[in-house]
Image (cartoon, rainbow, N blue to C red):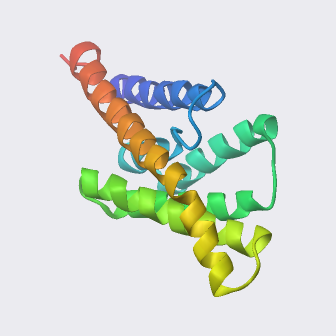
């Protein structure tokens, strides 16, 4: 029981550290939230909490960074990413890349609905202009997911071994 509590504390501590990086200067869309969503989905036993953790992290940091209508699409994307993470037996590179693509499509669909003409040309322009940000999304998602999973494994195997 004590080992489980230590592991849970480690999971939450790593999530808090990852969230803090969202508030530091970083390239646009190079953010920890996909990594947090997949990590929480894989490591937290209570699935409702696993879905709420990244949404809570987003909301708290968005209170500082700013809220807008696009947040509804962003939150929906991360809810879906958490759900996908819970359905995977193992979080893999294809899972991370699929999550990046899901975020790209859902968030930019929201941008198109809210800020572009409701035409095919507007949709194409919106997604075309978002492509440079997608590169950062993929990079951030791969980096943060890897750091969270590998750091957790290393710390758990080194410091949380049970006798």
- Camera-side residue of 43 and 19: 19
Residue 66 x, y percent position in the rendering? 81, 43
The image shows residue 123 at horizontal and vertical percentages of 63, 77
Q: Is residue 28 left or right of residue 45?
A: right
User: Which residue is painted at 54% across and 55% down in the image?
Assistant: 51
**Where residue 147 appears, x then y in whole percent?**
35, 30
- The quarter holding residue 160 reads top left
Counting from the top left corner in percent of width and height, residue 112 is at 69, 72
Q: Is residue 158 left or right of residue 74?
A: left
Q: Nearer the viewer, residue 23 or 91?
A: 23
Would you say 86 lies left or right of 79 here? left
Question: Is residue 92 visible to us here?
Answer: no
Q: Return the residue nearer the eye: 78 or 127.
A: 127
135 sits to left or right of 69: left
Give the answer, above or below, for where 94 lies relative to 38.
Answer: below
- Quarter location, residue 4: top left
């Amino acid at each position: 029981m004590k080992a489980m509590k230590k592991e849970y504390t480690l999971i939450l501590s790593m999530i808090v550290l990852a969230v803090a990086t969202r508030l530091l200067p970083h390239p646009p869309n190079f953010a920890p939230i996909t990594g947090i969503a997949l990590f929480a989905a894989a490591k937290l036993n209570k699935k409702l909490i696993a879905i709420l953790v990244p949404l809570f992290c987003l909301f708290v940091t968005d209170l500082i960074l700013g809220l807008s209508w696009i947040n509804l699409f962003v939150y929906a994307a991360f809810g879906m990413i958490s759900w996908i993470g819970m359905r995977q037996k193992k979080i893999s590179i294809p899972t991370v890349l699929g999550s990046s693509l899901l975020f790209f499509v859902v968030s930019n669909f929201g941008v198109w609905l809210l800020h572009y003409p409701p035409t095919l040309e507007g949709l194409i322009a919106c997604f075309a202009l978002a492509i440079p940000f997608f590169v950062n999304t993929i990079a951030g998602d791969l980096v943060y997911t890897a750091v969270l999973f590998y750091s957790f494994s290393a710390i758990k195997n080194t410091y949380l071994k049970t006798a």
